Every structure is written in C-alpha cells, then in structure tokens.
Amino acid sequence: MTTIRTGIGFDVHRLVEGRPCILGGVELPHPTGPDGHSDGDAVLHAVSDAVLGAAGLDDLGTRFPDTDEEWKGADSRDLLRASLAAVSEEGWRVGNVDVVIATEGPRIAPHRAEMRASVAALLGISTDCVNIKGKTLEGLGALAGGAGIAVQAACLIERD
Ligand code: MG
C-alpha cells in the first residue's frame, strides 16, 4: 500500500541592495536580492521545509543552523539536496511541489519556467510536478514596495 503525506513550508527574507537575487536556484536580474546567512534563496528554503515537514524531519533551521559558520554563504541548492537525501533515506519519494512567491520585488512570471525546471531537477522529478506562482501584495503590508519576499510551499511525498 502506498502511503502519502503532505508538508508545508514558509520563508521570508528582506530584499537588500548588493545581494544577488537567487530564487529557486535561478539568478534573476534585479537590483536587490534576499539577505541571509546563506544565499537567501527563500524559494528553496520553503521547498526544503515542505519536503522535510512532510516526512516529519524537523526543518531547515534545525538541520542547518544560521549560527553555524559551515552554512555561511551556503548555496541553498545544497540545502535542498541534503533535505531530499534525508527524506529519501526514509524511503520517501517526492510527488509534487506547489509554490507561491509573494513579492513586489523581482517579477516572477518571466523566470517561472526556468525556476520550475531548476527546482524539478533538484528534486529529481519532472517539471510538470513543480508549480510556481508569483503574487504581488497590492501595495499592502510590510513586504510592499519591494522590501521583502515571502514564499509558501506545499509538498506531497509517497512511499510503498
Ligand atoms: Mg530562509
């Protein structure tokens, strides 16, 4: 019998000048980028948390503490690979991932296909199993004016 589980992930980063704008493992042409201990890739952080959460394996912050020098400037693709490895070790396969990016910073739509392909390749699943949606904030809230980015992710995993 196949068992399925779902997980959710959420992440927020401040967007600041002088940082590359890396989201979903793709560098977007934008004057600001997510601040953070790692490369600040809020998409991969939320996806990692959704994958880990589905398997009941804590979260990114517990596994890769931002107080740990080892992860300073970390490539978030490595964080997702490590998260996936932990989940795979327990016999789980990722079914699909759905992502919402809320920001008034970089425009998501022109880069969506590349980001989907990037996340799918990292997870070892087909591109149609990764969906990414960009949302603006209607000029409201603390993230408005391009000051930040918030990402939600949902993930389904399964094992026999
Ligand atoms: Mg983060």
Image: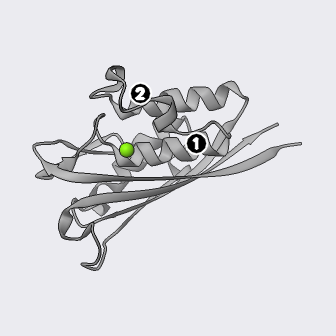
Q: How is the image coloured?
A: one colour
In this view, the residue in front, 3 or 55, is 55
- Farthest-out residue, top: 70
Query: Which residue: 67% across, 40% down?
Result: 56
Question: Which of the 4 image quarters holds residue 158?
Answer: top right
| Numbered label attached to residue 51 | 1
Residue 72 at x, y = what percent?
29, 26
Asked if labels 2 and 1 touch by Cβ distance under 8 angstroms, the answer is no
Q: How far across and how far down the image is residue 118, in percent?
A: 40, 41
Give the alpha-carbon distance from disc 1 to disc 2, as whole Å: 14 Å
Q: Is residue 29 visible?
A: no
Left or right: 2 as drawn, with respect to 103 = right
Question: Which residue, as the protein is rendered here, is positioned at the far front?
Answer: 67
**Total label count?**
2
Asked if the beta carbon under badge 1 is closer than 8 A to the nearest atom of ligand 1, the reply is no
Q: Identify residue for label 2.
A: 78
> Considering only order in the chain, which callout, 2 or 1, is on the residue closer to the N terminus?
1
Whether residue 143 is visible, yes or no, is yes
In the image, what residue type sits under mark 1? Answer: Val
Q: Is residue 117 left or right of residue 8?
A: left
Q: Residue at x 61, y 27 (%)?
A: 86
- Helix, strand or loop for disc 1: helix
Q: Residue at x 23, y 44 (%)?
A: 35
Image quadrant occupied by the N terminus: top right
Where residue 129 appears, x then y in whole percent? 56, 50
Q: Quadrant of the C terminus?
A: top right
In the image, residue 107 sits, relative to residue 123, either above or below, namely: below
In the displayed structure image, the side of residue 129 where residue 2 appears, left or right: right
Determine the secondary structure under disc 2.
helix
